[in-house]
Amino acid sequence: MTKALNYVLVRETQLRVFLTDPEVPLDTNHLEREIRPIPMGRKNWLFCWTELGAEHVGLIQSLISTCKLHDINPQTYLIDVLQRVSQHPASQVIELTPRIWREQFAGEPLRCPLYKSNEARNANR
């Protein structure tokens, strides 16, 4: 019982947030489901060759998971951002994060030329 009470006392601030805001979820299962592919593919990423390569894999996985949390197609997001990043002002780079990108650019994302040619080919069928 003492261990449980100490747990509550140490996390009192976080528990008060949970109790005052009904939007705060009771558990983190939704987050754990998003990171499940990471341990499943650990052997695949064992040989990233360098620490920088491993760091980049982590960044891409984080972006993809964030896209999924915000109901964004990761492929659409990455294609748009990779095309947009060269012309977007560096001072406004926060606009290219998934949450804000969805509000500003998801309605009309930039597409790759292959998408347009496939779209035209499908329309002719």
Image: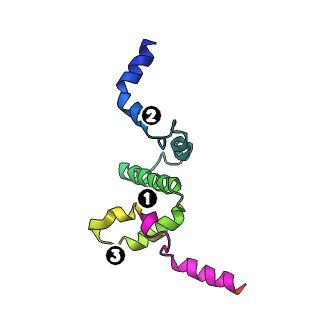
Q: Which residue is mark 3?
A: 87
Mark 2 → mark 1, Cα distance in angstroms: 26 Å
Residue 20 quadrant: top left
Q: Secondary structure at mark 2?
A: helix
Looking at the image, is mark 2 or mark 3 earlier in the sequence? 2
Q: Is residue 9 visible?
A: yes
On the image, numbered disc 2 is attached to which residue?
19
Residue drawn at (52%, 67%), measured in percent from left and top? Answer: 76
Do tag 2 and tag 3 residues touch (Cβ < 8 Å)? no
User: Which residue does the numbered mark 1 point to in the structure image?
Assistant: 99
Three-letter residue code for mark 2: Leu
- Residues 49 and 115: in front is 115
Based on the displayed image, in which of its 4 quarters is residue 9 positioned?
Answer: top left
Tag 3 secondary structure = loop
Segment colored magenta = 101-123
Query: Residue 35: where, in percent of width, then height?
Result: 51, 45
Q: Are marks 2 and 1 in contact (CB under 8 Å)?
A: no
Q: Which residue is at the far top?
A: 2
Q: Nearer the viewer, mark 1 or mark 3?
A: 1
